[in-house]
């Protein structure tokens, strides 16, 4: 099951603002949270402020890196599926 999830962590930028970023190697320091690579899961987590609770951070963190990661992953998966379908239909 863990191979189906990705890890996110909170990072503080130079201005003291908090952002949630994807930890692709699962090795960044700090408290992490695991999430399904699904657009709907990310949106629900943002709406319910799950990142704030899970990562124990204050305020509204920037979650754009997580959204972009999942969008790219979804687009990559769609391209792969199209290529497989194309290869199967070609003699």
Image (cartoon, rainbow, N blue to C red):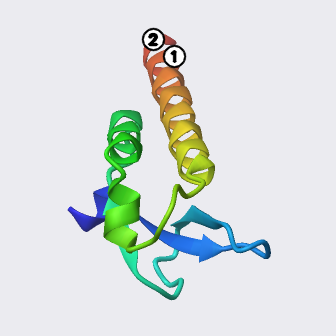
Q: Please give the label number shown on residue 86.
A: 1
Q: CA distance from mark 1 to mark 2?
A: 5 Å
Give the residue at mark 2. Answer: 89
Q: Residue at x 55, y 37 (%)?
A: 71
Quadrant for residue 15, please give it. bottom right
Nearer the observer, 81 or 70: 70
SS for callout 1: helix
User: Where 10 falls versus 71 (above or below)?
Assistant: below
> Residue 8 at what x, y percent from top left?
46, 66
Quadrant for residue 88, please give it. top left
Mark 1 neighbour class, 10 Å CA radius: few under 14, some 14 to 19, many 20 or more? few
Mark 2 neighbour class, 10 Å CA radius: few under 14, some 14 to 19, many 20 or more? few
Q: Please give the label number shown on residue 17.
A: none
Q: Residue at x 41, y 45 (%)?
A: 46
Nearer the observer, 13 or 83: 13
> Residue 60 at what x, y percent from top left?
52, 55
Nearer the observer, 85 or 35: 35
Q: Residue at x 52, y 68 (%)?
A: 24
Taking the image as shown, residue 34 lies to the left or right of residue 81, namely left
SS for callout 2: helix
Q: Is residue 6 visible?
A: no
Q: Are marks 1 and 2 in contact (CB under 8 Å)?
A: yes
> Residue 14 at what x, y percent from top left?
79, 76
Q: Is residue 46 visible?
A: yes
Nearer the observer, 74 or 35: 35
Taking the image as shown, residue 57 lies to the left or right of residue 5, namely right
């Amino acid at each position: 099951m863990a191979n189906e999830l990705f890890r996110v962590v909170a990072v503080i930028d130079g201005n003291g603002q908090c952002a949630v970023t994807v930890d692709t190697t699962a090795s960044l320091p700090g408290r992490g949270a695991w999430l399904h690579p699904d657009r709907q899961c990310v949106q629900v987590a943002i709406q319910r402020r799950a990142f704030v609770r899970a990562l124990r951070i204050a305020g509204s963190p920037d979650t754009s890196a997580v959204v972009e990661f999942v969008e790219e992953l979804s687009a990559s998966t769609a391209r792969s599926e199209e290529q497989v379908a194309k290869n199967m239909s070609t003699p």
